[in-house]
Amino acid sequence: MGIVNCTPDSFYPGSRRETREAAVTAARRMIAEGADILDIGGESTRPGSDPVGAGEERERVVPVIEAIRAESGIPISVDTRKAAVAGAALAAGADLVNDVSGLRDDAELAPLVAARGVPVVLMHMQGTPKTMQRRPHYEDTVADILEVLRERIAVAVDAGIARDRIICDPGIGFGKTIADNLRILRELSRFRAELDTPVLVGLSRKSFIGTVLGGAGEPLPVEERLTGTLAAHAWAVREGADILRVHDVAETVQLVTMLEAIATVERQ
């Protein structure tokens, strides 16, 4: 899943696309590099970020989705917490909804997804983007996240969303400490096994990678986190991740191709 940020303030400056033309150019490149899905978002949810109004978010993403759909049949995800934005995006040609709030923030979003019959990504987040990194705490990181995701799955099903249309995301970096993020990765196989849904992992270039690789010194800047990202992606694939949400499509496609070659070579 290639990330197309139609924003001026996403945490990775290299991913920001502030014009329709820049976003569509980025999307074309990701398609050529082998992306299977594009995730189009118009609101940064980086730690400490402020929400964006639905009107502005619509204006950022809908023209981009329309332009991509006019020239490609690639599945398009709209990264939004708002029913008004999701509805406009689906009408413009998007195929699924990726909600970082897990259908908590807008009561109209679950009925919309159910009525349209599209897949939805339910992500775990402790708090809100504005507050989530203020002393996050868990009694048992993975067990606590699994409990919340089970509850969000139940809410989605109760709203009429088909069980086989649900994808879960443990929310690496969203209300998590460095140790929490590492624990999620170490026990990632539990999410697929215990939730019985496909699992999406979004860790590309996030701050915990910079901190781990920085050691006792300063964290590595976001521009220097590709190697750590690829290492974490390799682990995630090994542990059963179904979808990797990434900034660097070409490098990730090469990584997955190599892993698949190793896994499928015939024994002598």
Image (cartoon, rainbow, N blue to C red):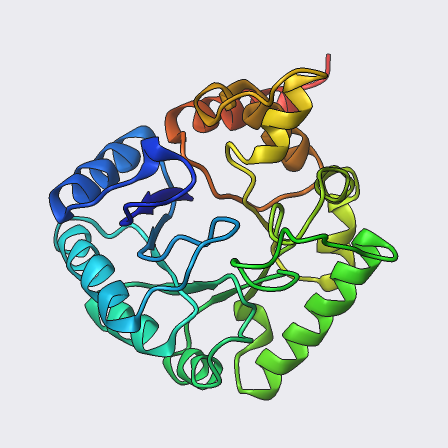
Viewer-proximal residue among 210 and 252: 210
If the image is split into quadrants, where does the N terminus sit?
A: top left
Question: Against 108, is 266 above or below?
Answer: above
x 63%, y 51%: residue: 133
Quadrant in the rendering for residue 89: bottom left
Residue farthest toward the top in the current orientation of the protein? 268
Q: Is residue 191 visible?
A: yes
x 76%, y 62%: residue: 146
x 42%, y 60%: residue: 50
Residue 186 image position (x, y, % from top left):
78, 37
Q: What count of labels does the image hold?
A: 0
Q: Is 201 left or right of 82, judged from the image as shown?
A: right
Question: Against 30, is 223 above or below?
Answer: above
Residue 77 image position (x, y, % from top left):
37, 57
Quadrant in the rendering for residue 113: bottom left
Question: Against 5, is 77 above or below?
Answer: below
If the image is split into quadrants, where does the C terminus sit?
A: top right
Quadrant in the rendering for residue 108: bottom left
Q: Is 187 left or right of 215, judged from the image as shown?
A: right
Residue 121 image position (x, y, % from top left):
52, 62
Q: Is 174 left or right of 42, judged from the image as shown?
A: right
Residue farthest toward the right in the current orientation of the protein? 139
Residue 245 image position (x, y, % from top left):
48, 43
Q: Is residue 260 visible?
A: no
x 61%, y 19%: residue: 218
Viewer-proximal residue among 66 and 203: 203
Question: Against 23, is 125 above or below?
Answer: below
Viewer-proximal residue among 41 and 74: 41
